[in-house]
């Protein structure tokens, strides 16, 4: 991308190295996980609305980590070319190295496409006109959709419903990871307290 190429040239002029940007990328990635964890805890104990703050910070730190990684890769390429002795033959990569590079390039493109879909207005949750979607406006829309569907469903039901689907399809471990439980036994107790599962009726007549 031209933007990252320009940033890499600026880093070279400033005397920065790929190692510095790799360390920065890892640091931003660590903060991303921290904010995601905080968002999960806030959502669990309060509401999804307050969780948008740490989740938004997680998106920001993730984008910083991606940018630092992209610049580091360009710096590594520049450092490799400059460290080669004059007249030396270029290094021929192994097929496994080429496959790894192809996978990394695919991941970079997918992440770039994901970041491009983020709201340009800076609002993580917005309407079609780009205005921030407040809790009250979102609640009214949810109420209208719920009445139109004729179901008794609330915001707080989303988390247990998602966990139940994961529990039924993938087992306790996956559901425990989604719920953020410290152990699988906690998840088992969580589901034992819920209603029984839906089963097929008896096919023969009684």
Image: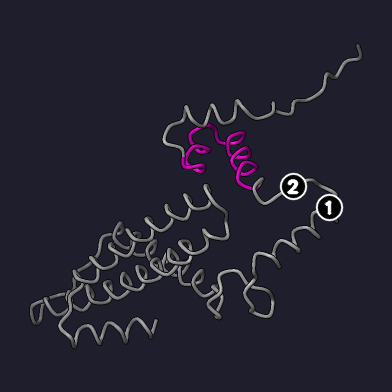
- Dominant secondary structure of the residues highlighted in magenta in the image: helix
Q: Residue at x 65, y 42 (%)?
A: 161
In the rendered structure, find residue 35 and report the number of the disc placed on it: none
Residue nearer the viewer, 173 or 203: 173
In the rendered structure, find residue 153 and report the number of the disc placed on it: 2
Asked whether 108 falls inside the magenta stretch, the response is no
Q: Is residue 106 above or below residue 80?
A: above
Between the residue at mark 1 and the residue at mark 2, the CA separation in whole angstroms equals 10 Å
Q: Residue at x 31, y 72 (%)?
A: 68
- Badge 2 marks a residue whose secondary structure is loop
The C terminus lies in quadrant: top right
Q: Quadrant of residue 202?
A: top right
Asked whether 169 falls inside the magenta stretch, the response is yes
Q: Position of residue 123 (x, y in %)?
A: 56, 74
Q: Is residue 73 above or below residue 40?
A: below
Write the start and end of the magenta stretch as one range: 158-180
144 with respect to 42 (left or right): right
* Residue hosting label 1: 149
Labelled pair 1, 2 in contact (Cβ < 8 Å): yes
């Amino acid at each position: 991308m031209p933007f990252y190429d320009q940033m890499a040239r600026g880093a070279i002029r400033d005397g920065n190295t790929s190692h510095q940007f790799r360390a920065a990328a890892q640091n931003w990635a660590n903060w991303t996980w921290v904010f995601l964890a905080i968002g999960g805890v806030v959502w669990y104990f309060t509401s999804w609305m307050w969780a948008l703050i740490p989740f938004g910070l997680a998106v920001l730190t993730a984008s910083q980590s991606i940018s630092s990684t992209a610049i580091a890769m360009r710096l590594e390429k520049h450092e490799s070319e400059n460290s080669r002795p004059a007249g030396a033959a270029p290094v021929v990569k192994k097929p496994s190295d080429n496959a790894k590079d192809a996978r990394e390039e695919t991941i970079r493109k997918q992440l770039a496409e994901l970041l491009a879909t983020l709201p340009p207005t800076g609002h993580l949750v917005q309407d079609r006109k780009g205005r921030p979607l407040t809790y009250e406006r979102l609640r009214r829309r949810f109420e209208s959709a719920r009445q139109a569907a004729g179901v008794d469903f609330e915001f707080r039901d989303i988390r247990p419903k998602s966990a139940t689907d994961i529990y039924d399809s993938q087992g306790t471990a996956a559901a425990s990871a989604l719920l953020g439980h410290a152990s699988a036994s906690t998840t088992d107790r969580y589901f034992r307290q819920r209603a029984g599962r839906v089963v097929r009726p008896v096919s023969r007549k009684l």
